[in-house]
Structure formats: structure tokens, C-alpha cells
Amino acid sequence: MTTNIVELEQITEPTSQQIIDENRDYTLFSWSVQNAANPVHLKRAEGVYFWDGDDNRWLDFSSQLINMNVGHQHPKVLNAIKKQVDELCFAGPSFATEPRGTLGKKLAEVTGLAKSFFTLGGSEANENAIKIARLYTGRNKIITRYRSYHGATMGSMTASGDPRRWPVEPGMPGVVRAFDPYCYRCPFGQKVESCHRECVSHIEEIIRMEGPDNIAAILVEGITGSNGLLIPPDDYYPKLRALCDRYGILLIDDEVMSGFGRTGMWLATQHYGIKPDIVTAAKGLTSGYMPLGTVIVSAPIAEYFETHMLYGGLTYSGHPVSCAAANANLAVYEEESIFENVETQGAYLTHRLNSIEQRFACVGDVRSIGLFSVIELVKDKVTREPLAPFNGTSPEMGKLAAYLKSQHLYAFTRFNMLWVCPPLIITQEQLGNGLDIIEEGLRIVDATLA
Ligand code: PLP
């Protein structure tokens, strides 16, 4: 009898192609023309690797949307989830639970802020951060930057400068945009060695023109992620912080991608010695094991809501299983010295990227901080003409992406850029292997352009 059941299961187990077909036939894929969606069947995973349905092992240089900081299937996080599931799967957001309080306390400790409002992901965190800033200041407008992504819900999408916002426009009213600290292609035509930080001073002009008393917050990514790793000069954040203080404007630091060890610190802005008024986070908060986002607010904002209504709530806010996953994940960062590994491997990565920049004609710029990095490709190093247009692609970028895929290296490409953002547990050997594959891909691009 038992044998028959096993045989039946074997017969009915779908093939990899059937799984892909069912996904394609019955589900919609994000940010994709549906007939161009070409998903890999991800069957199992461990550490920095995952396996497809044909048992090919892939090296994951994307950390699955720059998210799985402790890598795939970490036993400590899995055990914490299992334990929490056995004990208590759900509590409504008005109840107190042990994992929720523990997590709030830890987040206050590592950010220097006061209290967390939990969401399900980064988009919702930014939605709520904007709402909280408006409630607290009584002001309406939000300044964000053009090359930014803050999420895909209506408000967060409008707050983004990324072209992905275009279809929802006009979207949420009150968003005003500023230029970015994109030193390789400075919007002000300056050089970082000699500029006057026009990337900050023009924001002051925007504030004056929009009316300082109308502006609730400036919302920025700690380090811009999906628009190409824009690492600001050392004095950018101190100047931006001073600007906010001068006009009573809140600084909201979106650390959804750049936070929780990706740059080697809890928050990317900690590299610059400043403290935001509000931090939003998700992704590396649980390393993707469970959906969770947070809005962490300063003591004065927390104090304000002691006596004022917090107009906000979500059924799954403070979900006990998500909070338990986050607590275990944050413990892994410390117990396994993950940030130290980011520093060590980040130094190796920077060294390899600098060498790549020197040796390949198609590489215009490389930018990295910790294990957060991008290679920007150009047709010509002198003119800096991008290898693919803004918000577009090109045959050369297509060829590079296809080569990496053929070698089972999973890395994110967009416009004229290639991201190297592996799980933070990666070893030098694994990092080196992936970079060797990337070098071979760049050789192919160089040959195409020659
Ligand atoms: N903010 C930043 C900086 C992000 O990179 C992302 C997603 O990539 C988001 C917000 C949105 O987060 P989520 O996809 O969890 O809603």
C-alpha cells in the first residue's frame, strides 16, 4: 500500500517545465512584459547558492532582490520560525507579543531611534513614514530624488523618482523632486574634487521656492540602490542634515536596501555620522525569510504620538512569525560577525572592481560600499555614453546578461548597469569565482564593441 502511494506521488510530481508553465499561465510577473517573462524554476537553496529544476547550481550574486543577507536557508532563522509557528502563529496588531517587543527594543538600540511601527515590506514602510511625517509636522510636501526607488504602492511609487513611477502619475500629490549625488554624471556638470555640493545647495533653493513651512520631509535612500549605487561625498549627509534642521524638515532615511549590513553597518547613513528622524527598513531585517518592514521614529516623534492619534494600522503589523524571524536574523549578524565579513569581502570586491575598471574598455565606472556594488557600462570611456539608454536596454547588455545566465551566475542588470550584491556570508573564493565569470562576460562585450 505504502509503495503505491510513493509511486503515485512520483508519477504526479510536476516537471520543472510544468511548474514554469503553470507560473506563467496563472500568475503575473513583476516589472515584466508578460510574454517576455522567462523565470528560472528555483527548487532549493543553501547559503550563496540555489538549484534550478534541472539541478544546476547557481551562484546568487543578487541575494534575491538584494535581500537575503544571511544567505539561503540559514538554520538559526529557520529554527526560530518553526519555534514561533508552534507557539503562536498570529496575534492582532493591538496585542503585545514577546517577539514584537524584543525586535522594537533591538531596532531602537542599533539605530539610536526610539520606536518601530511594523509593516509588511518596504513600500508600506515608506507610505507610513510619509504619513507619520505629515501628521507630526502638520506640513504636506515631501522632497525626494529623481534616481530613487521607494516602492510600488501608490504613495511610495509616486515618491520614487525612478521611471517605474511614470504609469501611476500624477499619483500622490505633494511630491517635489531634486537631483542626486551622481558624481560620475553630475547633473550640475561639476567634479567632486572641486564642486560646492550643488547636489545639496539646490535642495535649499527648492525648499525656498516650495515654501519651507510646506515641507514635511526629505526622503532619501541611505545609498541609492536600484538606480545604480550612488554613493554621496563624505559631507553630503552632514550638509543635508543641517539643511533639514535649518528648516524644521524631517530626514527620512530609506534603508530598505542599503540597511542591515549590506554596507557593513546597520544603516548606510551611519558611515556619515548622522542620525535621521525616521528610518524605513525591510529586506535585510529578516533577510527575506518572512515579510516584514518597519518605520523607526525618533524620540520626539514617538513622544508626539503619546498624545496624538497614530492614524495608521495593518492587520499583519507586528506579525509574530515575522518578528521572530527578524530577531533570529539580527542575532546571526552579531553571532557570526557578518558585518566583519562584509568589510573583508567588501575590500576584496572593491579591489577586483577597480582592476576591472582599469582593464575593460566597456567599464566606465565602478561603485561599491561593503557588498553593495555596481558596474556601469559605457560605449566609450571618454564620452561616457551609456551602453544602454536610461530606462532602456541594448543588445550588448542583453548579451552580457545571457552570458552570466549561461554560466549560472545570477546577477541583476538594469539599463547600462550590472549589480554585484551577494549574500553577506560569501567567501572570497565564491566571490572570486563569480567575478571571474563577470570578467569573461565583459570580455565578450569589449569584443562586440571593438
Ligand atoms: N525602498 C527601497 C530603497 C527599495 O530598494 C525597495 C525595493 O526594492 C523598496 C523601498 C520597496 O520595498 P518592497 O519591495 O519590500 O515593498
Image (cartoon, rainbow, N blue to C red):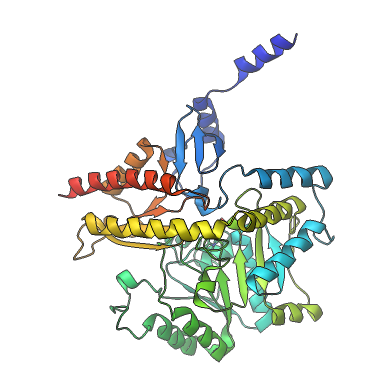
Camera-side residue: 208 or 360? 360
Ligand 1 placement by image quarter: bottom right
Residue furthest out toward the left? 450
Name above or below for residue 131 compared with residue 41. below
Q: How far across and down, in percent of the image, does residue 369 sit? A: 44, 64
Name above or below for residue 436 compared with residue 218. above
Name above or below for residue 406 compared with residue 176. above
Camera-side residue: 251 or 209? 251
Q: How far across and down, in percent of the image, does residue 305 sit? A: 76, 77
Number of marks present in the image shown: 0
Camera-side residue: 58 or 400? 58
Name above or below for residue 450 compared with residue 16. below
Q: Residue at image x 76%, y 56%?
A: 315
Horizontal side, residue 381 vs residue 47: left or right:
left
Instruction: Note whether residue 292 is visible.
Output: no
Q: How far across and down, in percent of the image, does residue 405 sit? A: 38, 39
Image quadrant where one finds the N terminus: top right
Horizontal side, residue 156 vs residue 367: left or right:
right
Q: How far across and down, in percent of the image, does residue 267 sit? A: 56, 68
Instruction: Note whether residue 81 is visible.
Output: yes
Q: Residue at image x 45%, y 37%?
A: 58
Camera-side residue: 43 or 214? 43
